[in-house]
Image (cartoon, helix red, strand yellow):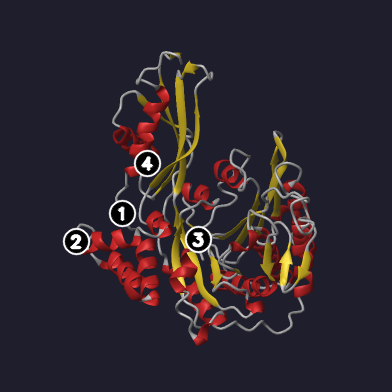
Amino acid sequence: MDMIARILAGAMLAAAAAPALAADDPTETAFRTTYKELVETNTTASSGSCTLAAQRMGAHLAAAGFTADQITYYATPEHPKDGGLVAVLPGTSATLKPILLLAHIDVVEAKRADWTRDPFTLIEQGGYFWARGTFDDKAMASVWVDTLARLKAGHIKLKRTVKLALTCGEETTGAFNGAQWLARNKRDLIDAEFAINEGGGGRTDGKGLVEGGRLVAQTVQVGEKASQDYRVETRNPGGHSSIPVKDNAIYQLSDALIRLRAHEFPAELNDTTRAFFARGGAVFGGPVGAAMQTVATAAPDSAAFKAAVAALDHDSSFHSTLRTTCVATMLDGGHATNALPQRAGAIVNCRIFPGHSFDEVRKVLEGVFADAGVTVTTMDPDHVLAKAPPLNPKVIGPIETLVAKHFPGVPLVPTMSTGATDGIYLEAVGIPTYGAPGIWANPDLNGIHGLNEHLEVASLLRGRAFLYDLVLAYAK
């Protein structure tokens, strides 16, 4: 089980049984068509086209009544297949700022030879949809397209303008990133009071509802860590391997990395993680639950806080949530099998708790290594830093109300992602971004990024209903 499911798996309340599906929805057929078309459009970096997928989604919006000036397609000459779209559904208020719905439409690579089924043919089997992107992130993307199409075609009057950004490049490091490009080049186009994105969602107890499982939690993501790579390097004159000396670039690097392994960044909390430990601890119970609640309430310099942190650090997920982490992920060194190495290097990947700069962490690493012969270089100094959005009642309140309505008895837990989403680019330009609950997964994450990705049919349809109501709650 992942962290959220472990926290709440013990809370098997009768009220958390499978939520009933909505009554027959006459718009469901159109939604399924949109979802199928998006999933079956290959958007991998190697052979797909986000530009084509965006055009196809734009056609659905145009068919619902969006005019040409309400849909903006974008791409750059250097990345013609990595395009996306921004759609704008105008509201009536001149004072309320818009909301932005964000979803990436690119997917992780998938090889037909490895999969049980064709990864780019949507198959419904055993109560699940199977194909690459069924979950990440074409479920949310298709729900957003469907939501705007239904609002437009239904002539539903909204006070607040609703915007939609479909972007490419989230899944591939170093690729053209549509969210980043929009934030840097089309800030006015995507301007919003806040954005709703991936990153939240529900978790089952280990089995899908169709298999008799239970939904044990819904989560709302409020903030995330920043990811940064550092190049750690040692150099040496080298020499012939037949005459070895202890002054060796590889040994020097190894000693530095051993010191890194022993180093712990201090535990810290923000509003989101404090709420996470408080709510999770109250439901989990037992010694772990007590430690979670102590972390949430005790003074950071108290013995009780330190003891609780020590207890929670045995769990790698809790450990990561409580602090910045840095870990060696790649190694290189030497130039010949019969020569003493002239250079050795490692990549150290850090996941940085909000509120700390890349340079601050670089200096901490230099202090940990405590060796002038070990250099530390920030690999991407221009990468954006995470900015934690507030637990804004205007955002969280409607989520709490609708989770209680759509998933009665299922607790809502705020989380901070220890990974990364495209929300980081919006937060960097002043658009707080939240990961919405609704669509759920099993603790194994249903093959996301791996083989045979799948999404429970009930999860998609109930998530669609929840997210539609959420947009209405924000915009009406």
Amino acid marked by disc 3:
Tyr
Amino acid marked by disc 2:
Ala
Compared across the picture, whether 137 is left or right of 215 comes to: right
Point out the tag, 1 or 3, that comes first from the N-terminus.
1
Mark 1–mark 4 distance (CA, rounded to whole Å): 16 Å
Mark 3–mark 2 distance (CA, rounded to whole Å): 34 Å
Compared across the picture, whether 276 is left or right of 139 comes to: left
Are discs 3 and 2 less than 8 Å apart at CB? Answer: no
Write down the residue under mark 1. 267
- SS of the residue under disc 4: loop
- Looking at this view, name the residue that lies furthest to the left: 302
Q: Nearer the viewer, mark 1 or mark 3?
A: 1
The circle on residue 303 is 2
Residue 276 x, y percent position in the rendering: 39, 66
Mark 4–mark 3 distance (CA, rounded to whole Å): 22 Å
Mark 1–mark 2 distance (CA, rounded to whole Å): 13 Å
- Classify mark 3: residues with Cα within 10 Å, few (<14), some (14-19) or many (20+): many
Point out the tag, 3 or 2, that comes first from the N-terminus.
2
- Classify mark 1: residues with Cα within 10 Å, few (<14), some (14-19) or many (20+): some
Point out the tag, 1 or 2, that comes first from the N-terminus.
1
- Classify mark 2: residues with Cα within 10 Å, few (<14), some (14-19) or many (20+): few
Front position in the image: 335 or 373: 335
Specify the quadrant that holds the C terminus: bottom right
Compared across the picture, whether 191 is left or right of 390 comes to: right
Write down the residue under mark 3. 434
Point out the tag, 1 or 4, that comes first from the N-terminus.
1
Q: What is the tally of numbered marks visible in this picture? A: 4
Residue 425 x, y percent position in the rendering: 52, 47
Res 314 → quadrant: bottom left
Residue 196 x, y percent position in the rendering: 55, 61
Q: Nearer the viewer, mark 4 or mark 2?
A: 2
Write down the residue under mark 4. 357
